[in-house]
Amino acid sequence: MFDIDRWREIFQSISKNKLRSVLSGFTVAFAILLFTLLFGIVSGLQNQFKTAFADDATNAMFVRVWKTSKPYKGLQTGRRIQLKNKDFDYVKEEYEDKIQHLTARIFKSVNITYKNNQNNYQLRAVHPDHQFLEKTIIDEGRYINELDLKNNAKVIVIGRLVKQDLFGEKPALGKRVNVDGISYKVIGIFSDEGGDNEERLTYMPVTTAQKLYGNNDYINQINIGYDPKLNLDQAITFGNRLERDLRKKLDIHPDDQSALSVRNMAEANKGINQFMFALYFIVIFVGSGTLIAGIIGISNIMIFVVKERTKEFGIRKALGAKPSSIIGMVIQESILITTIAGYLGLSLGTYILSAIGDSLEKYFIKDPSVSPGIVIGATIILILSGLIAGYLPAKKAAQIKPIVALRAD
């Protein structure tokens, strides 16, 4: 394999037949280039999906209610459905074994003032588990806890951009802000991978909001983090059962989609997985077809190589060369051409993805790239391709009898 004289002969053969060598490598280079571009685009789509759901837990469910669109059990159309604490407690007790995290949400638009600075922000009144469902990153201080709920504490957690608006570069932790005329203590500052809009939010205990803003037990939404041990199909079944049970409890028609919905991330994840599987299958199918065409092309050209060098191989055998040395020489030449061409295609594909990556975001393709696993796989494919493409003509060359080879035209 590392015989210098053999490698010298291989390079001489390639240099004497430049056009043949270029043509034999072109199909492989094109196949790997296409393979790289397609995998990069699929990877970019996958990155876009991850970014779109970056600020929500992958095992989340969202229970929302609106007005009814169908009469049911003597109740009229247009009835406003209202979730209450008892509905939250029902979900908590009924499905305890299937739930990892659980929180209510109350939405409110508030005006927050600190000294001479003020602005309007969206407030979410929540339970402590909301931090994990929303993937809230605490930069300073802490999040809401159970003691805050129990004491109806007037505390608030503010987003990074809220802190920037109201406090600038000055510390905000422990300071008091005025929220619609009521004083709250800032106990935490957070950031969120969801972007600027998510970092202009504020959080307070759900019990505090219920007491101070309406003196009732109403909630707007229930968010659930199902047990991550459930597979996607089990999580979807759980979500469907939860929706059916809540419809019965709230006297909502089974087919009334306007009154209640359970948005289940498991359904979205399953759809994305199926879509990505189909894309990867298409990429592998197309790339493999092109690669096979390249292998056939190299194999055909290697047959011509063998034919051109028939007399040479006959003389080698007459002088005592072993068939294995002839097979090895032909296979080495095939592997060398395939590997060089393949890496040229891989390098070009990687460069193109890097060069045009940012311009593809408008097509929902984010940071297209090729993973190390694909590079390793491509390397293995290249070696095997060269081996396959060169073996058959090499075997034929090794079987030629010296007397027949010497008579060859």
Image (cartoon, grey):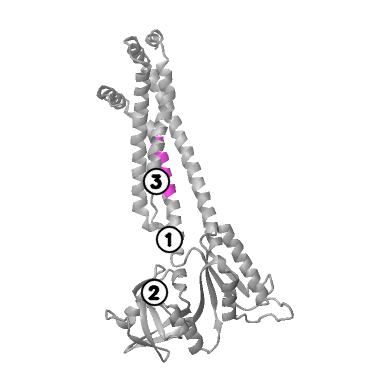
Q: Position of residue 369 (x, y in %)?
A: 38, 51
Q: Position of residue 337 (x, y in %)?
A: 35, 31
In primary-sequence order, the first of circles 1 and 2 is 2
Which SS class for mark 3?
helix
Name the residue beneath numbered marker 3: 373
Cα–Cα gap, marks 2 and 3: 35 Å
Crowd around label 1: few <14 · some 14–19 · many ≥20 (10 Å): few
In primary-sequence order, the first of circles 1 and 3 is 1
Considering the whole magenta stretch, tell me its main secondary structure: helix
Q: Is residue 266 visible?
A: yes
Q: Position of residue 246 (x, y in %)?
A: 63, 73
Position of residue 81 relative to residue 376, above or below, is: below
Q: How many marks?
A: 3
- Residue numbers of the magenta segment: 26-39
- 241 left or right of 35 in image: right
Quadrant containing the N terminus in the rendered view: top left
In front of the other: 323 or 304: 323
- 76 left or right of 391 in image: right
Number of the front mark, 1 or 3: 3
**What amino acid is at disc 2?**
Glu
Q: Quadrant of residue 358?
A: bottom left
Residue in view at x 51 percent, y 77 percent: 105
Q: Is residue 278 magenta?
A: no
Name the residue beneath numbered marker 1: 362
Find residue 199 and name its label.
Answer: 2
